[in-house]
């Protein structure tokens, strides 16, 4: 089938690194295969060797230690959906995972595949960007860390050199006054990929001053993007209905400017305001609970 001449199924990180070394530019990692198989079938991807990491337990984990949360690249959306950590203030991550495709896609599809496929519509990426997550990249030389934001080099491109793979993502543990919200607008029933999604991380103090805020959108650029101009409207201010309206207005302006000339802008503009509103409200509720 296709041009595949050899398949590897590494059972350890050492075996994976060896397979990457052996195959060089002709090898392709396959995790859940939900993107790779489609691309192979369409001829959009050529590879002589597949390195199947779907049973590599060393990259399937969720752990908390030393103030950090780490999620292994091989963790599936279903694993994230079912993990107790992603309730409460972290629920925005679970919401991102729950919105992906169908149960079958969520059982097979991995967080690492979603990130490395680098689609602007990747649902798990905005919540991770809002959490200021870092990509943990492994090679024979060891581990290196890269902000997830800088890991994306454009549509379909990530900062992985030959011999490297995505081991995990990590981000700071959330504290009591912080919350993460996610909202997606998309034709989910058709199993299509979302056209719009937003994630909001917020930190509030007792007087409702916004100590920190990070907003990330999907499907509104070559990759998911942080919306820093909108964050600047909110950061350091007291949370009021007027401020929220000011932020929604800024959001509309920023998106309108970015989408100028693209079809369906009117629809997107209104939809994105609503999606932002929902994600923000969820983050506030979680920060206050
Ligand atoms: C019907 C259908 C519906 C879908 N709906 C959605 C949706 O609603 N939302 C959404 O976001 N996505 C959706 N997708 C896309 C897809 O399911 C996700 O992007 C998924 O997360 C890909 O993960 P995977 O494990 O299947 O990746 P794979 O297909 O195995 O790999 C994807 C890419 O990542 C690379 N890769 C994988 N793991 C690693 C690693 N550890 N290190 C380095 N590179 C790696 C592969 O080489 C490949 O380039 C849908 C797909 C289908 C077919």
Image (cartoon, grey):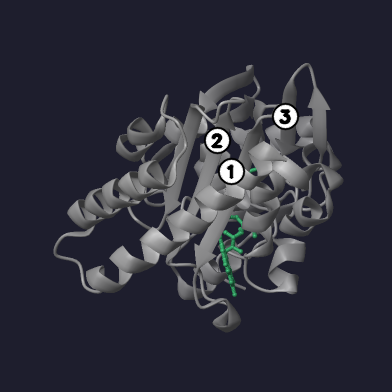
- Going by the image, does 43 lie left or right of 53? left
CB of mark 1 within 8 Å of CB of mark 2?
Answer: yes
Quadrant in the picture for residue 88: top right
Q: Residue furthest left?
A: 261
Rendered position, 250 above or below 231: below
Gap in Å between the C-alphas at discs 3 and 2?
11 Å
* SS at badge 2: strand
Identify residue for label 3: 176
Mark 1 or 2, nearer chain start = 2
x 74%, y 38%: residue? 72
Mark 3: secondary structure: loop
- Look at the picture and state if 117 lies above or below 2: above
Residue at the image position 37 percent from the left and 59 percent from the top: 273
In the picture, the disc for residue 284 is: 1
| Dot 1: element | helix
Q: Which image quarter: residue 50?
A: bottom right
Closer to the camera, 219 or 145? 219
Camera-side mark, 1 or 2: 1
**Image quadrant containing the C terminus:** top right
Whether residue 201 appears in this view of the structure is yes
Q: Residues within 10 Å of mark 1 (few under 14, many from 20)?
A: many
Query: Which of disc 2 and disc 3 is earlier in sequence?
Result: 3
In the rendered image, residue 237, in percent from the top left (x then y), is placed at: 41, 28
Q: How many marks?
A: 3
| Residue position for label 2 | 202
Q: Is residue 119 visible?
A: no
**Neighbourhood count class around disc 2 (C-alpha, 10 Å): few under 14, some 14–19, many 20 upward:** many
């Amino acid at each position: 089938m296709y041009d595949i001449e050899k398949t590897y199924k590494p059972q350890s990180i050492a075996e994976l690194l060896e397979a990457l070394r052996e195959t060089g530019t002709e090898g392709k990692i396959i995790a859940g295969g939900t993107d790779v198989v489609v691309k192979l079938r369409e001829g959009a991807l050529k590879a002589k060797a597949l390195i199947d990491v779907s049973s590599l337990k060393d990259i399937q984990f969720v752990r908390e230690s030393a103030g950090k949360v780490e999620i292994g690249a091989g963790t599936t959306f279903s694993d994230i959906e079912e993990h107790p950590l992603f309730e409460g203030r972290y629920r925005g991550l679970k919401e991102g995972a729950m919105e992906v495709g169908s149960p079958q896609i969520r059982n097979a599809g991995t967080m690492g595949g979603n990130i490395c496929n680098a689609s602007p519509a990747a649902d798990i990426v905005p919540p991770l960007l809002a959490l200021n997550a870092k990509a943990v990249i492994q090679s024979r030389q060891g581990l290196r860390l890269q902000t997830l934001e800088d890991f994306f080099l454009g549509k379909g491109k990530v900062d992985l050199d030959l011999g490297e793979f995505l081991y995990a993502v990590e981000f700071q543990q959330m504290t009591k006054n912080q919350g993460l919200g996610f909202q997606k607008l998309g034709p989910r029933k058709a199993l299509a990929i979302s056209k719009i999604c937003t994630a909001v991380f917020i930190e509030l103090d007792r007087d409702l001053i916004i100590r920190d805020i990070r907003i990330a959108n999907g499907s509104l650029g070559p990759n998911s993007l942080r919306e820093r101009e909108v964050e600047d409207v909110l950061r350091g201010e007291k949370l009021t209905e007027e401020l929220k309206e000011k932020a929604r207005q800024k959001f509309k302006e920023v998106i309108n400017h970015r989408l100028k000339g693209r079809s369906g802008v009117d629809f997107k503009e209104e939809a994105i305001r609503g999606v932002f509103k929902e994600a923000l409200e969820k983050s506030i509720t979680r920060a206050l609970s």
